[in-house]
Amino acid sequence: MKNAEVRALSLEELKEQIKKEQTNGQTLRFAHAISPLENPTRIKHGRRNIARLLTELKRREQEQNS
């Protein structure tokens, strides 16, 4: 997910996407602990997506408070 795509999301969609990415990341980590994933970089990309989403959420919250 690119930054432009993240900015295009509404606030509710943003929160929903964060939850989705977090559960997906947890599932990937559990699967990787049991047996190695074919593409372990998916975990890394998931973490980065979560960080992008959380950053955008914080930015919007700060805009509302200002």
Image (cartoon, helix red, strand yellow):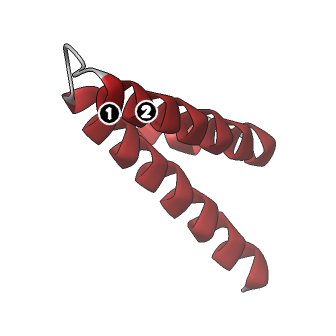
- What residue is disc 2 on? 30
Residue at x 73%, y 38% (from the top left corner)? 16
In the rendered image, residue 3, in percent from the top left (x then y), is placed at: 41, 42
- What residue is disc 1 on? 33
Residue at x 53%, y 50% (from the top left corner)? 53
Front one among 37 and 62: 37
Q: Residues within 10 Å of mark 2 (few under 14, many from 20)?
A: few
Residue type, label 2: Phe
Can residue 13 be seen by looking at this rendering? yes
Q: Is residue 66 above or below residue 50?
A: below
Tell me the quadrant of the picture where the N terminus can be found: top left
In the rendered image, residue 26, in percent from the top left (x then y), is placed at: 50, 38
Query: Does 41 sit left or right of 61 as displayed?
Result: left
Circles 1 and 2, Cβ within 8 Å, touching? The answer is: yes
- The image quarter in which residue 46 lies: top left
Residue at x 43%, y 33% (from the top left corner)? 30
Question: Please, which residue is most extreme toward the bottom here?
Answer: 66
Mark 1 element type: helix
- The image quarter in which residue 37 lies: top left
Residue at x 44%, y 38% (from the top left corner)? 4
Residue type, label 1: Ala
Q: Residues within 10 Å of mark 1 (few under 14, many from 20)?
A: few
In the rendered image, residue 20, in percent from the top left (x then y), is placed at: 63, 33
